[in-house]
Image: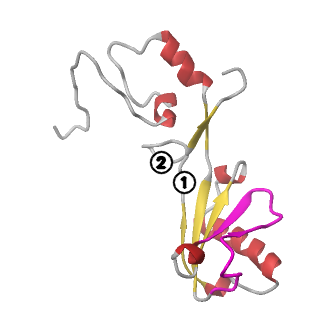
């Protein structure tokens, strides 16, 4: 106890760790995993799609539309207000934007500038709260989705 490490002995084990954690070799298996399992872990790709959740002081977008389209190639908008999350937009960021090293403030500004171009008005002052996910930095996931990489 207290050291953060625990030894568990068992004849069989079912492992449900996220692929990103397995790819990062964050867990030691004794005995080591078989080579076929290690090859499979190495072959499957791990990607990152992050979200920006924005709450505004008012709804300025079409309230009756669940999805709001944009020409930005790496952003997709979900109307949270339509689904019961008042005055909220959920923004999906795809790669390479999802791997950004920008601060949360910079990411929010980029998203809001996109919205300003879409709706033709100043919007930054309407933001009352924001959350930017960083799944690639989360030690318990190290990514947000897996995919069949070339050659897998």
Q: CA separation, marks 2 and 1?
A: 7 Å
Q: Magenta span covers which residues?
A: 59-79
Number of marks in the image?
A: 2
Q: Which mark is residue 134?
A: 1
Mark 2 residue element: loop
Work out whether 25 lies above or below 85. above
**Quick check: 7 above or below 83?**
above
Which residue is at 66% across, 21% downward?
152
Image: 118 above or below 71:
below
Label 2 sits on residue? 138
* Above or below, comparing residue 59 to residue 44 in the picture: below
Q: Residues within 10 Å of mark 2 (few under 14, many from 20)?
A: few
Pick the residue in front: 91 or 25.
91
Q: Residue furthest front?
A: 64
Residue at figure coordinates x 52%, y 29% from the top left:
23
**Would residue 77 be counted in the magenta stretch?**
yes
- The circle on residue 78 is none
**Location of residue 114 in the rendering, given as x and y in whole percent from the top left corner:** 77, 71
Q: Position of residue 100 (x, y in %)?
A: 66, 53
Mark 2 in CB contact with mark 1 (< 8 angstroms):
yes
Q: Please give left or right for residue 130 compared with residue 14 in the image.
A: right
- Which residue sits at x=51%, y=42%? 142
Instruction: Report helix, strand or loop for mark 1.
Output: loop
Camera-nearest residue between 28 and 60:
60
Give the prevailing secondary structure in the magenta stretch: loop
Q: Position of residue 131 (x, y in %)?
A: 53, 67
Residue in view at x 33 percent, y 12 percent:
31
Q: Classify 10 Å Cα crowding around label 1: few (below 14), some (14-19), many (20 and above).
A: many
Residue 102 rendering spot, x and y as whole percentages: 65, 59
Between 50 and 88, which is closer to the camera in this rendering? 88
Decide whether residue 65 is among the magenta residues. Answer: yes
């Amino acid at each position: 106890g207290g050291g953060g490490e625990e030894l568990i002995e068992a004849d069989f084990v079912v492992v449900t760790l996220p692929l990103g954690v397995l790819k990062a070799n964050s867990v030691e298996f004794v005995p080591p995993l078989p080579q076929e399992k290690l090859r499979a872990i190495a072959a499957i790709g791990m990607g990152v799609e992050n979200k920006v959740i924005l709450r505004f002081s008012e709804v300025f977008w079409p309230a009756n539309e669940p999805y709001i389209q944009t020409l930005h190639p790496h952003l997709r908008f979900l109307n949270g207000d339509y689904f019961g999350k008042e005055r909220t937009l959920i923004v999906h960021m795809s790669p390479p934007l999802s791997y950004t090293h920008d601060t949360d403030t910079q990411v929010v500004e980029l998203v809001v500038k996109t919205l300003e171009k879409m709706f033709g008005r100043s919007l930054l002052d309407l933001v009352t709260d924001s959350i930017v996910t960083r799944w690639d930095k989360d030690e318990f996931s190290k990514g947000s989705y897996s995919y069949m990489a070339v050659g897998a």
